[in-house]
Image (cartoon, helix red, strand yellow):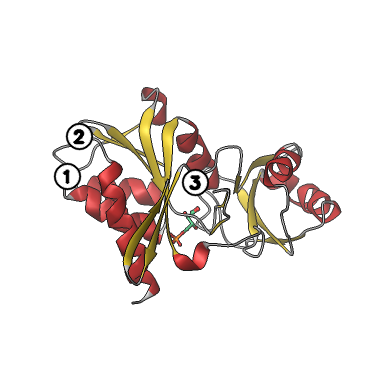
Amino acid sequence: MTQDEMKKAAGWAALEYVEEGSIVGVGTGSTVNHFIDALGTMSDKIKGAVSSSIASTEKLEQLGIKVFDCNEVASLSVYVDGADEINPAKDMIKGGGAALTREKIVAAIAEKFICIVDGTKAVDVLGQFPLPVEVIPMARSYVARELVRLGGDPVYREGVVTDNGNVILDVHGLAIDSPKQFEDQVNALAGVVTVGLFAHRGADVVITGTPNGAKIEE
Ligand code: 5RP
């Protein structure tokens, strides 16, 4: 089974968490694209979606799913999104697709975070995948110097501008033993919009695509 087939298995399995008549929180990425395809099969049974990126919004709308502004929706029963890494405590690194800030906002209003991944994303210690940090452009060099002081090796993601008009620093060389503490430390730097560590708001359910189908951990 290919990695994409495992992503597809996870994405389609997430459909069982979608309640009829609800507004669904939708993340970003290649695994989520499979979930959006699945959601399209029940587009007439849901009220709509809140999306975490322009790319996901376009795909949802192509399938006839109404996309609500996040400000119009007070709460969501579920938010379905992928991850770049996930540890046994269900803390995640996200933002490989540069959508981390909007992902964190939509996740914050959801009762349940359903994380959909293939088996390659599971790790014991977060940090092998470079940690994305969304930064206000004028703060890029300052934040990079501070990230070096925190033990990382930040690399500017050239040519990428986020949906919010900011830039991304990818921090290499980390082994994050205390994800909540590190999330707080990076978020406290002036000019940081969001760090792609999802520890304070980790996943509630993990659906992993495997060669034998989807494995669900609650
Ligand atoms: C985007 C994300 C994605 O969820 C993450 O990068 C995983 O992507 P994929 O499903 O394509 O492997 O955080 O910002």
Specify the quadrant of the image occupied by residue 194. Answer: top right
Q: Are marks 3 and 2 in contact (CB under 8 Å)?
A: no
Q: CA distance from mark 3 to mark 1?
A: 28 Å
Q: Which residue is mark 1?
A: 42
Q: Are marks 1 and 2 in contact (CB under 8 Å)?
A: yes
Task: Identify which residue is drawn at 17% across, 43% down.
Answer: 43
Q: Which amino acid, by three-letter code, is at mark 1?
A: Met
Would you say the beta carbon of the disc 1 residue lies within 8 angstroms of ligand 1? no
Q: Which residue is mark 2?
A: 20
Q: CA distance from mark 3 to mark 2?
A: 30 Å
Give the image location of residue 57, x and y in percent: 33, 45
Q: Quarter holding the N terminus?
A: bottom left
In-front residue for pair 87/190: 87
Q: Which residue is mark 3?
A: 163
As helix, strand or loop, the secondary structure at mark 1 comes to: loop
Task: Identify which residue is drawn at 34% across, 58% down.
Answer: 10
As helix, strand or loop, the secondary structure at mark 2 comes to: loop
Q: CA distance from mark 1 to mark 2?
A: 9 Å
In this view, which residue lies farthest toward the right? 149
Give the image location of residue 212, x and y in percent: 32, 69
Q: Give the mark, 1 or 2, whose residue is nearer the N terminus.
A: 2
Q: Give the mark, 3 or 2, whose residue is nearer the N terminus.
A: 2
In-front residue for pair 138/30: 30
Q: Which amino acid, by three-letter code, is at mark 3?
A: Asp
As helix, strand or loop, the secondary structure at mark 3 comes to: loop
**Mark 2, residues whose alpha carbon is within 10 Å: few (<14), some, or many (≥20)?**
few
Q: Give the mark, 3 or 1, whose residue is nearer the N terminus.
A: 1
Q: Which amino acid, by three-letter code, is at mark 2?
A: Glu
